[in-house]
Image (cartoon, rainbow, N blue to C red):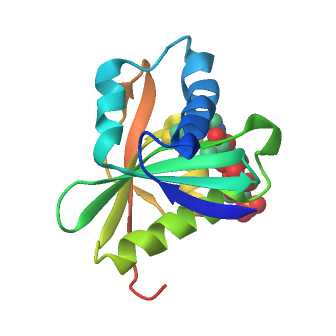
Amino acid sequence: MDIRIFKEGTADYDRALALRDRELRQPLGLRFTTEELKKDEHDWHFGLFDGDEIAACLTLTACDGSRMKMRQVATDSAKQGKGLGRILSHAAEKFAADKGFEVMFCNARKSAVPFYEKLGYKIVSGEFTEVGIPHYTMEKQLTHGQ
Ligand SMILES: CC(C)(COP(=O)(O)OP(=O)(O)OC[C@H]1O[C@@H](n2cnc3c(N)ncnc32)[C@H](O)[C@@H]1OP(=O)(O)O)[C@@H](O)C(=O)NCCC(=O)NCCS
């Protein structure tokens, strides 16, 4: 498997978007809105691929000079629990640290909080609702040269 970083408008982006739709939106009975997808334009998109088949994805949004947001984290349901989300998150953290970002944060679904805790993220907010389900903001200090 290889990790690829790509921009919006590429074939890999379309593959990631299909995975995001399947794992993050369809189970909630939702579809991506044009407004949501507009956010993707300036972001870095990461995918873990077996050939052209995507197994996991995530997106990074730079919020200011020091804080990077990790969002749209998803692993194909047939491949969850095999360490792929961890591999891709670590690659994204290294990418952000190498660019000088100091903190990675995310708005984590309550159901995914144990996953982020395993990766070293801490809850830094109260519970709030996004896409109709409970979330917490979680963050992790990035280490340079990690
Ligand atoms: C959450 C998600 C991205 C995790 O990806 P994954 O590839 O299955 O995760 P990994 O296999 O790399 O898991 C890393 C560790 O977290 C644990 N973990 C993963 N998801 C977990 C969960 N929901 N509850 C408890 N532990 C979990 C794994 O057991 C593993 O622990 P270990 O190192 O002790 O073995 C994936 O389950 C998913 O796509 N879920 C649906 C979409 C979603 O909720 N995305 C997150 C939105 S915030």
Image coordinates for residue 73, horizontal then vertical, percent: 54, 45
Looking at the image, residue 42 sits to the left or right of residue 109; the answer is left
Q: Which of the 4 quarters of the picture holds residue 2?
A: bottom right
Q: Residue at x 36, y 29 (%)?
A: 37
Image coordinates for residue 42, horizontal then vertical, percent: 29, 47
Looking at the image, residue 34 sits to the left or right of residue 9; the answer is left
Q: In the image, is residue 13 above or below residue 31?
A: below
Q: Residue at x 36, y 56 (%)?
A: 105
**Residue nearest the observer in this picture, 82 or 51:** 51
Q: Which of the 4 quarters of the picture holds residue 68?
A: bottom left
Image coordinates for residue 45, horizontal then vertical, percent: 46, 51
**Residue nearest the observer in this picture, 67 or 3:** 3
Q: In the image, is residue 26 above or below residue 95?
A: above
Quick one: which residue is furthest to the front in this view? 10
**Residue nearest the observer in this picture, 21 or 90:** 21
Q: In the image, is residue 106 above or below residue 36?
A: below
Quick one: which residue is furthest to the left in this view? 64
Image coordinates for residue 83, horizontal then vertical, percent: 74, 59
**Residue nearest the observer in this picture, 37 or 112:** 37
Quick one: which residue is furthest to the top in this view? 29
Q: Residue at x 75, y 36 (%)?
A: 77
Q: Is residue 29 visible?
A: yes
Q: Residue at x 64, y 25 (%)?
A: 22
Q: Is residue 142 visible?
A: no
